[in-house]
Image (tube, coloured by chain):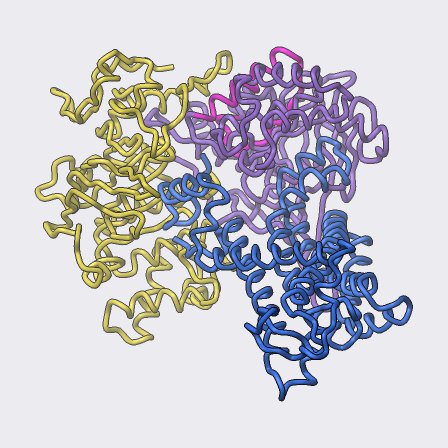
Amino acid sequence: MTANVPGLASPLLVVDGLVKRFAASHDLLGRVRGRVSAVEDVSFGLARGETLAIVGESGSGKSTLARLLVRLTPATAGRITFDGIDVTAAKGKDSLALHQRIQIVFQDPYASLDPRFSVGRLVGEGLFHSHMDRASRRVRTIDLLEQVGLSASLIDNLPHQLSGGQRQRVGIARALAAEPDLLIADEPVSALDGSIQGQVLNVLRALRADRTLAMVFITHDLSVARYMADRIAVMHLGKLVETAPTEQLFARPAHPYTQALLSAIPRFGRGGGARTILPGDAPSPIDPPPGCRFAGRCAWRTDLCDRVDPALLPEVSPEHSVACHHWRSIDVDAVAAAQSA
Amino acid sequence: MTRDVTPAASEAVLTAQVLDATRRGPWRILKSRSATIGTVLVSVFVGLGVIGILLLLVPGLDATWKAQDLGNALQGPLSPGSPLGTDPNGRDLVARSVVAIGVSCVVAIAVTILSLVIGVVAGLVAGYYRGRIDTLIAGLIDVTWGFPIILLAIMFAGMMRPGFTSIILAVALLSWAGIARIIRGYALSLREREFVAAARALGIPGWRIIVTHLLPNVTAPILVLASYYIAVTIVIEAGLSFLGLGIQQPVPSLGQMLAEGRNFLRLSAWQTALPGGLLVMAVLGFNLLGDGLRDLLDPRLSRPQS
Amino acid sequence: MTTLGAVDAALVSDSPPTPLLEVRGLTTVVDGDGWSAAAVDDVSFSIGRGQIIGVVGESGSGKSLTALSILGLVAPPIAVTGGSILFEGRELVGLREREMRRIRGAEISMIFQEPTTSMDAAFTIGDQLVETIRAHRPVDRRGAEALATQMLDRVGIASAARRLRAYPHEFSGGMRQRVMIAMALLLHPKLLLADEPTTALDVTTQAQILELIGELRTDLGLSVLLISHDLGVVLDIADRVVVMYAGRVVEETPSASVAGSPSHPYTQGLLASKLSLRHRDRPVTVIDGQVPSLRHRPPACRFEPRCPNRLPKCGESEPELADVPGAERLLRCYNPSPWIEP
């Protein structure tokens, strides 16, 4: 499966057929019982300075994907290429260099900061490999804090003295310290209250503009994805079901799951027509069925869907791919509802 | 802010608890009566121990606890010239007890420090790296765990002269396992915390993560373990010395005094009651202190859930 | 797939004859070590039959404690110190525990954000449902099972009879939430308190659960107090919205008004921060600063430090919650400004 990169000569990141499976449990004899297929044959590309949003709900594998990209966990199969370097095979010095160029911001602002480290020390950890002396490190730390909108006076504070939004920004400053080319943001605002989310989103947005930072923005919230991303990839149960430039996705959502997600966006009393409510719940990622993984919740399911897993193909337009056998014949009303969201 | 998970633990209660817990600091230990008693007992014990060590080390002071006076043997407490009486050889029991306490302190602290160093390093390394290193270390822990202390003490007593070194080595070489097991458990769970993942993602090397992230977060259990292990070691040393495998005459040890006194039980129960009572005081004190530390450092373990 | 239509206007009754629940001046205080603060401070609202009232607020607003106070589920160091809660004319504040227990589950029920904590993992859900029924009604086991099956079916659990024998961990998050709703409605209470029922769920599941709650209101005449930090969730199904900030009610008005023209600067901030996501070319609207902690609340208007409309008098005295003439609205603000859609 070749990566879907719209007309770019040398993309910054290419993910090719990435797979991550692990054992669900072991029986008494140590044999594996049930395989969790967390990420299955995921491929996409990312250009320099571009923001790609990966949208999925729980169990979609999006967090596993984030960890794969920063090599916190090894892939079962597939390849990640960053600026021409094969990330999956990197070791030693190359590996270290990659750690500095691809950085991550985590979801939980409470868990991702060591409660015993001061803000200065936390950000300083990002400078670990820079071999700066104490004075320059401090200067750089203050600079980073200012970039994320935090006052330098917080430098000696401990995490519990900060609000969720401030903590998250410390995490961002830490990730930026190493001057990465690619930032993986794993649900950076999901754990924050609504009015605080904006603070962090604005910081990320400004960063993108200033420093041509490429971003993989992982979220379950399509409204946030629309705001932040140039392109969106929708993930369901370990597989990408649709990828498209943001506006195209909202203008013409092809996959029924995308339509359901769009339909679930709160309306705030501003129109929308009938809602698409999916029956049942997301199936478990353990031992998934052979055919389309969305079939169990899909109103347009046929025998073909149960037997053959549809491939992600650029059928809607050269930049707009969908993994569905019947996308063309799907309800146009749903499309209209999405347009007013 | 993070959303609350449990219904009863509303935001307000959590806030109240956090606000209360972060004030006051170490003095909170005095809130617990048992912890206060423990602290007092331990302070007395250690204080006496320091005096005992001085008596042991300063050359001129031997006479206090070595001088025999067979005519004055087995006196009870409050005898003239010997407030706590004398032992079967007429030696003053005040001096001997104080030195014995000093001996207990030295052995207990040395053993505890040694086993903590070995045990904490082993536990953290095993828990963080997992895989083969963990299997190896966990295996070592299991083997050591079941090894009989007396056998090892005899071996060491045979290889070198029985005394401080042999007993410290013997006990430390076995106690590290219990500590390692507990610390390994902590390391296994700490490793999964997101701030450790963040450090790994930054390319921070493993050893540094262990030292800067894991170690500071296990200081609480280390302190609690230390106090319990000191208590346990005092008893083990007393037991081994009782059997003659530990500290040798003329240096007194609580266990040794118990052994001596045993022969004269019909004549004077005091000979065993004194060292026995001091042992009880020591163990009780360190245990209570350990409980107090645990309550102070990890209140979730002891406070009722709201 | 089912569809969620617009709320039937005929069902929305804005001025019912006697409200089912009337909360007046409710004050719930937290007692710390040498300090105390009112987490719920003089809160009043009422719920009519068949009405869904949404309470919106962020952390520290006191919204969850309000619900817990209604059911007497607060224990020291938290206690209800003032106000009255009238349920069908009967005073709940100060009611003896024995009486309160008869009301819980049977007249007023509650569901929470995390279903796992209200279900015992060691028992099948059938056991738990049956136990709940038999604690309040003189039915034999078989009868109780029949009722339980019926309710599970009603909340959309397939093969309900068979599922009675399943354990909580065998259900997914959304299903567990449905089971919790079933458990709450087993005895046909008149009022359901829902504390962040969809926060821990995926958006698609959230839509299902909200739809379910709406249906249950229509079919069973159930009244609902829906608590959420998410304004969108509340505006989806609530008839009226009560906005809380730092223990106080700052605005109360029908949903349509909040959605179309919120008055209080805080409400406006909440709505604007969500709607501004539609504009990719500019920064998201944010409310400066953060929610004050229990112990360090501003002395006068609690929102004043963060308010774009603040006047000197806002820092001197706290505005009262007052009727806005000509509109069906209660507002606690000296200086509201007209709503500008982002």
The chain whose colour is purple is A
Where residue C264 appears, x then y in whole percent?
26, 21
Q: Main secondary structure of the magenta part?
A: helix
Whether residue A303 is visible to the viewer of this picture, yes or no, is: yes
Where residue C318 appears, x then y in whole percent?
21, 23
Check the picture and name the quadrant holding the N terminus of chain C. top left
The stretch in magenta equals A196-224
Which residue is outermost to the left? C17
Chain C's colour is: yellow
Q: Is residue B266 magenta?
A: no
Examine the rendered structure and indicate whether residue C288 appears above or below residue B246. above
Where residue B267 appears, x then y in whole percent?
63, 87
Instruction: Kindly identify the residue that appears in the image at 12 percent across and 36 percent down.
Output: C15
A73 to the left or right of A141: right
- Which residue is nearer to you in this view: B46 or A62? B46
- Which residue is nearer to you in this view: A209 or B233? B233
Whether residue C207 is visible to the viewer of this picture, yes or no, is: no
Which residue is outermost to the bottom? B266
Instruction: Kindly identify the residue that appears in the image at 42 percent across and 59 percent down.
Output: C119
Instruction: Kindly identify the residue that appears in the image at 55 percent across and 36 percent down.
Output: A108
The chain whose colour is blue is B
Instruction: Kindly identify the residue that appears in the image at 48 percent across and 51 percent down.
Output: B299
C115 to the left or right of A38: left
The image quarter in which residue B105 lies: bottom right
Check the picture and name the quadrant holding the C terminus of chain C. top left
The image quarter in which residue A97 lies: top right
- Which residue is nearer to you in this view: A4 or C166? C166
The image quarter in which residue A62 lies: top right
Examine the rendered structure and indicate whether residue B145 appears above or below residue A189. below
Where residue A304 appears, x then y in whole percent?
63, 46
Examine the rendered structure and indicate whether residue A150 appears above or below residue B86. above
Q: Is residue A206 magenta?
A: yes
